[in-house]
Image: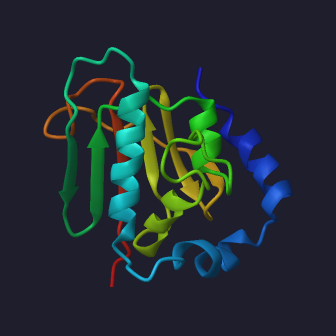
Amino acid sequence: MTCDYDAIRRENELRYGTDIGRIGPMLLANRYDDRTHFIYELLQNAEDALARRLNWQGSRTVSFHLNKEVLRFTHSGEPFNEKDVRGICGIDEGTKNLTEIGRFGIGFKSVYAFTDRPEIHSGIENFAVESFVWPIASQPIPRAPPWGQGLPSDVFLNLPLFLP
């Protein structure tokens, strides 16, 4: 069963307020001098997810697919669970342990330098993140080559790009 995105959103509204969409760019999206820093964050998250996928004998590759409208990033790491959904939709609520890089729960927010509504499709979870912390259900996407291995457990991140 998928996470209750509405409940997580209500909790996050209480925790972070309803004005996070306005102050988020200043506090989160523009935190890094290098706007391409999000690429390192995506790679680090993929590495961590692959490390959590015990006894995995499949592909350990990551893929970037870019066109004029969207950047799609895929990997075959551990599928998202509720703790991961809450972590990516939170601030300072990452799921990493003390030995992993990036324990502060804000690195993923660097994608907001290029998108305002990242989508995550992983295992049974299909959601977008609005205003940095508000998950909302999204339609599942086709999970077939060339987008990853075509397995339900692949992790797909769709980053619809700001259009000029």
| Direction right: furthest residue | 14
Q: Which residue does the image show at 47% across and 26% down from the upper left?
A: 124
Q: Relative to residue 111, is residue 60 depicted above or below? A: above
Q: Which residue does the image show at 69% across and 33% down from the upper left?
A: 4
| Direction left: furthest residue | 146
* Residue 62 at x, y percent in the picture: 23, 43
| Direction top: furthest residue | 55
Q: Which residue does the image show at 15% across and 35% down from the upper left?
A: 145
* Residue 36 at x, y percent in the picture: 33, 73
Q: Which of 95 and 3 is in front in this view?
A: 95
Q: Which of 148 and 57 is in front in this view?
A: 57
Q: Relative to residue 46, is residue 111 depicted above or below? A: below
Q: How many labels does the image show?
A: 0
The answer, for residue 115, to whether it is visible in the render is yes
- Residue 158 as seen in the image, left or right of residue 22: left
- Residue 46 as seen in the image, left or right of residue 9: left
